[in-house]
Image: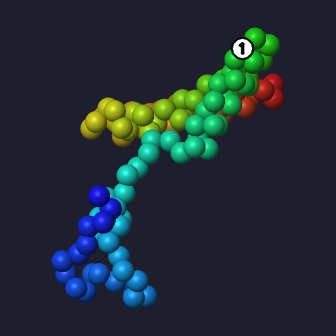
Amino acid sequence: MRYRWFIDKDKQTDEFGMPVSRAEYDEALHPQTKLYQRGELLAIVVVMFILLYEWTTDDNPLLFMCVSFLTFELRPLARAFLGKNGRAVSNALTGFSVALFVGALFWSFM
């Protein structure tokens, strides 16, 4: 239903005089947000493969770095599915993932 037009005469054209449909105007008012972009999903998949490889080779610091990244990427899911507590859980996941990453970084240089 992309061919709905404005009733008001002043909203029918944009600032350059091109005709604008009401659907484009409504889509701009209500943007649809995705949980993850394509690049983020690719990064999650790559980190999962690295995680499995590091699990088999027993390289623990890099394993914890991968777990830290995957924990950090759980934030949008927590925000979307936990309702009013989603923001608090998202902040807790952020803090935990940063602490886990810093700990894994120190562990890798020891």
Q: Which quarter of the picture shows residue 108?
A: top right
Indicate the quadrant containing the N terminus: top left, top right, bottom left or bottom right.
bottom left
Q: Identify the residue at image location x=28%, y=36%.
A: 83
Q: Which quarter of the picture shows residue 107?
A: top right
Indicate the quadrant containing the C terminus: top left, top right, bottom left or bottom right.
top right
In-front residue for pair 96/82: 82
Measuring from the top left, give residue 44's x and y in whole percent: 61, 33
> How many numbered callouts?
1
Q: Identify the residue at image location x=68%, y=31%.
A: 46
Q: Is 20 positioned to the left or the right of 53 in the image?
A: left
Residue at the disc numbered 1: 55
Q: Is residue 71 above or below residue 55?
A: below
Q: Which quarter of the picture shows residue 53?
A: top right
In-front residue for pair 83/107: 83
In this view of the protein, can residue 109 be seen by the observer? Answer: yes
In-front residue for pair 81/104: 81
| Colouring used for the render | rainbow
Measuring from the top left, give residue 89's x and y in whole percent: 39, 33
Instruction: Say what secondary structure mark 1 lies in.
Output: helix
Residue that protrudes farthest toward the left in the picture = 7
Measuring from the top left, give residue 26's x and y in whole percent: 29, 64
Q: Identify the residue at image location x=67%, y=29%.
A: 47
Q: Is 50 positioned to the left or the right of 79 in the image?
A: right
